[in-house]
Amino acid sequence: MIEMRDITKHYGAVQALKGASITIPAGKITALLGSNGSGKSTLVKVLAGLVSPNSGSILINGQPVVIRSGNDAQARGISTAFQDLSLLPMMTVSDNLLLGNEPRTPFGMVDREKSRQIVKDLMDRFKIRCSPQDYVQSLPSSTQSMLEIAKAVHRNPRVLLLDEATAALHMDEITVLFDILRDLRDQGLSIVFVTHRMHEVFELCDEAVILRGGETVKSGPVTEFTLDDLVYYMTGQRMAHHAPGQDVSETSRQGQAVLEVKNLSLPPRVKDVSMTAHAGEIIGIGGLEGQGQSDFMRAILGAKHKTGGSIRFLGEEVAFRQPAQAVKAGMGLISGERNREAMFPDRTIAENIFAGNAAVGPRFRFLPKKFVRKFSEDAVKTYRIKIGSLKDAASTLSGGNQQKLVIARWIAVGPKLLLLDDPTKGVDIHSRLEIHQILRESAQKGMAVIISASDMDELLEIAQRVYVFYEGRVSGVLQGDSMTQENMVSLMMGFTNEKADGLLMKSKEAQA
Amino acid sequence: MSAAEHRDLIPWYHPKKLLISFRRSPPLVAFALSALLFLITILINPKGLNNRFIGSLILLTTLLAISSAGQTIVLIGGGMDFSVGAVMSAAAIIATYTMDKQDSVLIYVQVLALSLLMGAVVGLLNGFFVVKIGLPAMIVTMAVSNIITRLQYVFTSGSPAGWAGQKFVDSIIYRFFDLIPSIVIYALLFVPVVFWILNRSRFGKQVYMVGNNRQAAYLTGVRVNWVIIMTYVISGMMSAFAGILGAGYKATARVDIFGEYAFTSLVAVIVGGTTFSGGVGTYTGTIAGALLMTVLSNLLTTLGLPQTMRDILNGVIIILLLMLYNRSKAVRQ
């Protein structure tokens, strides 16, 4: 059993943890829940030895310990699968799994035969389908996540920390993972499971600990909570329920066609995709992760170059060679990969908000200081971004607020078409609802919005029409009454509309 | 308000807070270190505290600060320009050769046009090779720098080429009130241009964006390649301008006369708080860094050590300084 008591940690002026406590019993799966910026990741990192707390104590089986480093944590039987993977992209699957843990021959060399066997067993157990000699960077993100977990499990820990381990996994992989985790639990492991997906908590976890603003606000057996309770403790507010495919859908279709895509191809990722978006519409792009959604959006923006098909934007045929042209013409892209593709972490919050404007305006015209400040102040106010000071580095913000920052950057520029590529990835439910609200308001003012998301509930809630991608093609379009979870799931699995109907019929027959 | 509370509001009452504000502001550190080294210099050689000494300190600092402006912009954009010294030398040679002891507006215009054109072309080459061929900036600019230096030999046959006009020389080294060198007039024109480019234009914002996160800048609609090439072009032109001023200071120019500025400007920029990784830095910091480098060099001269010993000490101190500046801060991951 591990206890963490009154842990505090601050980064400069930002208080990430203020007296968070958690008890992790053996033989149980403990869910660690909280909004973005509640301190979950920091708490996990403290236990993993990556962050040293400013105060507080950690007890293992009642004995106070100090965890100084990642190695220290591992020596004490604490193993972690990180959200932003600890794999080395230029090394093979096999090397990654065994890194620092290689079986040795009596002469101290790596025992290749034994290595092969261990890796094979591990990959079979996790049902990872790739070659042990593949380079990690060549694998889809879901496989990489699975490897990250397999690597952590391979170290035979007493405590296993999973920081948003399921965020990138496909449904079948999640099933495999959950079975393994239940096994490990029954063997007496302590497991900490961090997630934003509430249904996973009820499906898998025994205990729940909820953080808010760096403090532990509630803990107890999962059976004592309802979904509404969890959301309430995480956000301090009761959940607002939106009816799916909200009201605007009737009026919006009258808007001008902003984007008309015909038979767009970008082999091997996108094949023959057509789509139309009108002013004021929110279009959803669904599907499992990595089915060509990102490439499709980047092809529209000119960041990738299509090999076939046509794109009409505002009634004119376009073929942008780089995003700068698309942005100038009135498009914007928001990527869910905040760190890699959206944030300027060392620059100030003000500069990050102003970035969209900075990219398009006249380059060498004098830019008064006041102008930039006013621009960002307005955006912060309008989009309710929680900040200390506009002059702070953007990296001091929590994930949800960072994403709001990026969205504010674009909406403030007022594009005709806004592309969002899984924008709420790793964003807590409260910020997510706020982001949805901002998008709805912008659509009502006449912006066309195309949003992709791996979470289908999100799309069903916000979009008026959903194009579901499967292996680079549109496997079906849902709208109005057809926008149901069942239809969506079957399209995501690659059944086309007709096949899906057939499948539903069958399942109904089976029930009858 | 009690005395203790009052004290809390003033940072310099608290050594710890003072340390923190120093660490957040590299220019402040550089200025403070300069003051310290200056003090040591004066203590070692009290006679050195005279108008001539201070005047030459200002002159050399100004020249280095102007030489390092382009380097600052390139480094913030995520690159590095090792051709600063070669371009300065080439511009100095163009200046002295063209002037050949004469002074007239027409000649000045010729010098300026030729030098800036040369700087722009070199910058264009640097930028083009870095962006289009994707080679590391340090290697490319070093290679280009070598070519420029060899061309200087070809052009001058190795002997000093011509003399700067006397009026031009005076416009650099004349001392107002027997103290302030007239080169500061050029600085008063030049420095606002740098601040405008870096801090008060969208181009400057784009340079910071590209340096901090290239992919994000690209997807946000910045013409990343164009911006990077432009940083090298601007750097080339600014180095050329610095070279012309340098020609006035030295009166004549031989091959590679300002070669050491490639390295010195880089150190001044880094010591001023601009990072190797790009996206962070200010020109104020570079000015502070230039002052620190000049004061340090003066101190080593005052010590009266042989040249070899001076160079060794200089290297050791620079490494210590760079270590001081590269200490990572605690940030949220």
Image (cartoon, helix red, strand yellow):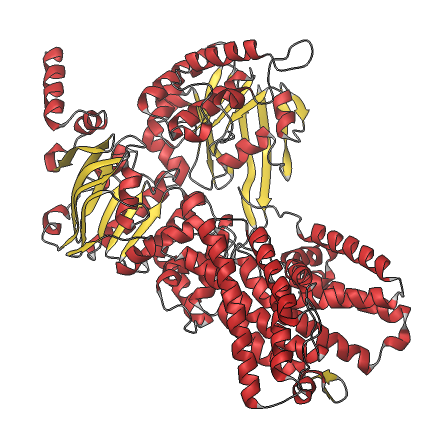
- From where the camera sits, is residue A244 visible? no
Is B141 drawn above or below residue B39 in the view shown? above
User: At which x and y percent is residue B320?
Assistant: 75, 52
| Quadrant housing the N terminus of chain B | bottom right
- From where the camera sits, is residue A334 visible? yes
Q: Is residue A130 left or right of residue A477?
A: right
User: At which x and y percent is residue B122?
Assistant: 53, 64
Closer to the camera in the image, A404 or A236:
A404
User: At which x and y percent is residue A258?
Assistant: 17, 53
Closer to the camera in the image, A290 or A403:
A290
Q: Quadrant of residue A330?
A: bottom left
Closer to the camera in the image, B243 or A138:
B243
Q: Is residue A171 left or right of residue B195?
A: left
Q: Quadrant of residue B249?
A: bottom right
Q: How many marks?
A: 0
Q: Is residue B234 left or right of residue A459?
A: right
What residue sits 17% from the left and 57% below the top? A314
What residue sits 80% from the left and 58% below the top? B311
Closer to the camera in the image, B140 or A177:
B140
